[in-house]
Amino acid sequence: MAVLQHKLTLGEAADLLSRALPGHRVEILQGRLTATPPPDGSHAQSLSWLVVAFDGAGARKAGLRYVQGIGLWLPALPDDYAIPDFSVVDEDFRDALVQKNCYAPNVFRLVMEVTSSNWSDDLGPKVESYAEAGIPVYIVVDRKHDEVLLYQDPVDGKYDAPQRFKRGQSVPVPDSVGVSLDLAVDTLLDGD
């Protein structure tokens, strides 16, 4: 009996991996397939706290929405996409659906990642990919190195060196996001 072999595209492989690993976050970054395990409790609490913080700062009244785990279509390669932990987007972001539950980068005002076992992706390929996509503000809650990094205003597809914030400090959300808010580093790193 002859067996036909079909070479999977990267997108097809990502779909198969998503179904095989429920609860994992599957992304394609710079042409590389990645799978991240579900978040731990501190990671989840940090994200829940962000919802409360942005709500308290009036993000909805400012025409913004804050969401967890929606896809961000990345323009560098045809199959690339990321699923940031937390994003602040324009209220009409749903009109910018590209495909596969991923939205165009122009509706994202802020993207935040809380590092897990894949911390090197958040500090490497995602910095490059988000800058290339023109994401105005990228915050990395770097639990591996116990600090928070703030990247902003990419020029020619690159961010300048990040501002670094240590425990006991607060990260000011840049005005370009559309709300006035300071985020406590300790709460970002530890959750509630």
Image (tube, rainbow, N blue to C red):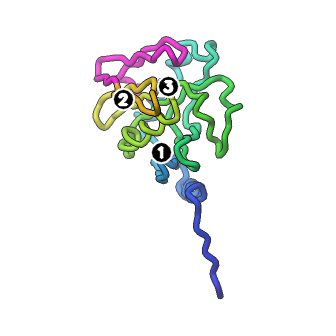
Mark with earlier residue (2, 3): 3
Q: Which residues are magenta?
A: 163-192
Residue type for callout 3 = Pro
**Disc marking residue 190:** 2
Judge left or right: residue 103 versus residue 35.
Answer: right
Quadrant assignment, res 19: bottom right
Decide: few, some or many residues near mark 1? Use Cα within 10 Å; few <14, some 14-19, many ≥20.
some
The image shows residue 121 at horizontal and vertical percentages of 40, 43
Q: Height in image: 191 above or below 101?
A: above
Q: Height in image: 56 above or below 93?
A: above
Mark 3–mark 1 Cα distance, whole angstroms, equals 27 Å
Question: Is 31 included in the stretch rendered in magenta?
Answer: no
Q: Which residue is mark 3?
A: 136
Pick the quarter of the image with the N terminus. Answer: bottom right
Residue reaching furthest front? 156
Q: Height in image: 172 above or below 15?
A: above
Whether the residues at callouts 2 and 3 have beta carbons within 8 Å, the answer is no
Judge left or right: residue 185 versus residue 62.
Answer: left
Question: Which one is in front in this view, the residue at disc 2 or the one at disc 3?
Answer: 3
Q: Residue at x 58, y 68 (%)?
A: 7
The image shows residue 98 at horizontal and vertical percentages of 66, 40
**Disc marking residue 38:** 1
Identify the element where label 3 is drawn: loop
Q: Residue at x 29, y 22 (%)?
A: 167
Residue reaching furthest right? 95
The image shows residue 135 at horizontal and vertical percentages of 51, 29
Identify the element where label 1 is drawn: loop
Q: Residue at x 45, y 23 (%)?
A: 153
**Disc marking residue 187:** none
Residue type for callout 1 = Pro
